[in-house]
Image: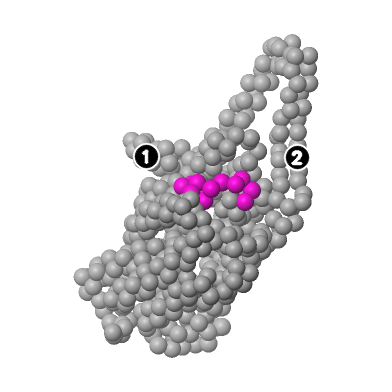
């Protein structure tokens, strides 16, 4: 099969290529669903993984981005982004098949360390393929349609993720009930299937034509300095690094918290994940339209505070004695998280592409990935260490009311290992949002103005009104409701002091 780039692509070749890239994206999403997220964490816990090992597993996808300099070197040497992406994609899928065979070859004591070793190469080759693919597709998609294309592609892949996740959760529940000794074997077959599907996706990617491009032959380190010397892009790097550090302190441990501390069945965790993905699917196209119409920075400024609210809300999960109350809170958190992530992740990808010059996109994007990978790979390890540190520590703030007719104890704050972690992550995320203000983007519109426009535009759409229209002002609504409640209590105390005392 020839993977030689073409000097110019026809409109039909571009259209066909973008359609094939969606198919390849579906294959990649199936592969990731089968081997990642709650399923990977559940397998690791089943095999006795510690918090630190969970943190290492979570850090691998971003740590291996440090090797993306190899992508620049390969593209500069061969001037063939297609060949680099296809070859590295192939080598990334092979370790998954080996992981699937692993449970039949090694003992449980050695499984987790072997899993980490093999997944390192899976993520390594995937990271090398990434910049080539990003620079390749940047030349295929018109700049004014980035939001629309990636939101459409994202909605398809997320839909597949939802359907596949539910099917796998039902399968694993069935195996656990009927064949409790075969859970590990089921995970093994999932990894083998993921590797095969991924390899098929690589074959599809090989069918996409590539427009010829040439990368400057200057010294690689000198090339890397260019994005760092770009003042505006450097500000984006600072924000992006702070943001991924903040969220990756806590995000990898949400599943661990639900499975180990709350004792929630895996099927419930998958359902909650699906709820978040459905919220993501239903809103990602709306975010894409608004990011194209206004700016990616504005969308991030709207979505980031929503995500911070979710991090804080995690601190209240588990303080209720009734499981139903905790599940309702978890469902609400996952819905808002899905809405927020749809806008944030889409806009982070697009703003990086938008601020990168066409002739140096691979260098700019690789530099961003390398810099942010340092922070996002360190964060889960730090999170695991913090979780271990706070395991034997807790902070409890209790209010007690004592009277002739009523004695009541209120738990105002209850922080332990995971709650501390989530609160720390929220604090760092808040700092990151402040750094976003320094980034400049063409066509940028004031956040408050966009919020008003969005609420006006979606007032006639019930779905968006519920999922976006209300949530974009959720932090302000909660604060306003709190102040109103305090004023009502003060007014009642002034006019009815005896009633207030009786309470």
Depth check: give the residue in front, 366 or 389: 389
Q: Name the residue that disc number 1 marks.
A: 463
Q: Position of residue 53 (x, y in %)?
A: 64, 65
Depth check: give the residue in front, 329 or 477: 329
Query: As drawn, is 24 to the left or to the right of 312?
Result: left
Q: Are marks 1 and 2 in contact (CB under 8 Å)?
A: no
Residue 9, quarter of picture:
bottom left
With respect to residue 212, does 404 lie above or below? above
Residue 342 visible in the picture: no
Query: As drawn, is 282 to the left or to the right of 243?
Result: left
Q: Which residues are magenta?
A: 260-272
Depth check: give the residue in front, 246 or 439: 246
Mark 1–mark 2 distance (CA, rounded to whole Å) = 39 Å
Look at discs 1 and 2 and give the one toward the viewer.
2
| Element type where label 1 sits in the image | helix
Residue at 33%, 35% in the rendered image: 460
Q: Position of residue 197 (x, y in %)?
A: 37, 69
Let me know if residue 266 is in the magenta part. Answer: yes
| Element type where label 2 sits in the image | strand
Residue at 37%, 74% in the rendered image: 199
Q: Name the residue that disc number 2 marks.
A: 396
Residue at 48%, 40% in the rendered image: 471
Query: As drawn, is 57 to the left or to the right of 32?
Result: right
Residue 87, quarter of picture:
bottom left
- Count all numbered tags in the image, as a single digit: 2
- Within 10 angstroms of label 2, few (less than 14), some, or many (20 or more) residues? few
With respect to residue 483, does 52 lie above or below? below
Main secondary structure found in the magenta portion: helix
Q: Position of residue 14 (x, y in %)?
A: 26, 70
Let me know if residue 481 is in the magenta part. Answer: no
């Amino acid at each position: 099969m020839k993977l030689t780039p073409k000097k110019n692509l026809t409109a039909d070749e571009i259209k066909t290529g973008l359609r094939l890239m969606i198919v390849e994206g579906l294959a990649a999403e199936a592969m990731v669903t089968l081997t990642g997220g709650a399923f990977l964490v559940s397998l690791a816990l089943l095999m006795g993984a510690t918090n630190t090992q969970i943190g290492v597993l979570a850090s691998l996808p971003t740590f291996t981005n440090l090797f993306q300099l190899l992508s620049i070197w390969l593209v500069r040497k061969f001037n063939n982004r297609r060949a680099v992406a296809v070859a590295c994609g192939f080598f990334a899928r092979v370790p998954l098949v080996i992981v699937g065979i692993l449970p039949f070859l090694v003992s449980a004591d050695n499984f987790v360390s072997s899993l980490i070793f093999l997944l390192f190469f899976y993520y390594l080759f995937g990271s090398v393929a990434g910049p080539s693919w990003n620079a390749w597709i940047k030349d295929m998609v018109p700049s004014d349609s980035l939001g629309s294309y990636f939101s459409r592609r994202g909605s398809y892949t997320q839909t597949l993720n939802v359907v596949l996740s539910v099917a796998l959760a039902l399968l694993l529940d069935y195996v656990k009930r009927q064949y409790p000794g075969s859970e590990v074997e089921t995970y093994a077959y999932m990894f083998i299937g993921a590797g095969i599907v991924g390899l098929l996706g690589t074959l599809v990617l090989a069918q996409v034509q590539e427009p010829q491009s040439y990368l400057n032959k200057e010294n690689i380190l000198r090339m890397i300095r260019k994005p760092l010397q770009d003042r505006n892009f450097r500000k984006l790097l600072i924000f992006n690094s702070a943001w991924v550090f903040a969220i990756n302190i806590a995000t990898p441990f949400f599943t661990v918290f639900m499975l180990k501390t709350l004792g929630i069945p895996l099927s419930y965790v998958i359902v909650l994940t699906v709820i978040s993905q459905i919220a993501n699917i239903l809103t990602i196209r709306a975010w894409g339209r608004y990011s194209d119409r206004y700016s990616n920075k504005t969308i991030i400024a709207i979505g980031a505070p929503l995500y911070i609210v979710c991090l804080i809300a995690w601190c209240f999960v588990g303080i209720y004695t009734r499981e139903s109350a905790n599940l309702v809170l978890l469902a609400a958190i996952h819905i808002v998280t899905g809405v927020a992530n749809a806008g944030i992740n889409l806009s982070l990808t697009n703003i990086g592409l938008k601020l990168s010059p066409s002739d140096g996109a691979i260098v700019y994007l690789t530099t961003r990935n390398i810099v942010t990978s340092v922070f996002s790979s360190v964060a889960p390890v730090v999170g695991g260490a913090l979780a271990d540190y706070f395991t034997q520590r807790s902070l409890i703030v209790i209010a007690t009311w004592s009277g002739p007719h009523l004695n009541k104890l209120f738990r105002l704050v209850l922080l332990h290992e995971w709650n501390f972690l989530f609160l720390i992550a929220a604090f760092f995320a808040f700092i990151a949002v402040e750094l976003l203000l320094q980034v400049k983007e063409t066509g940028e519109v004031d956040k408050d103005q966009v919020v008003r426009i969005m609420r006006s535009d979606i007032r006639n759409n019930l779905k968006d009104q519920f999922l976006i229209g209300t949530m974009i002002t959720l932090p302000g609504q909660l604060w306003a409701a709190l102040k109103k409640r305090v004023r009502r209590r003060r007014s009642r105390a002034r006019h009815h002091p005896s009633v207030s005392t009786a309470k």
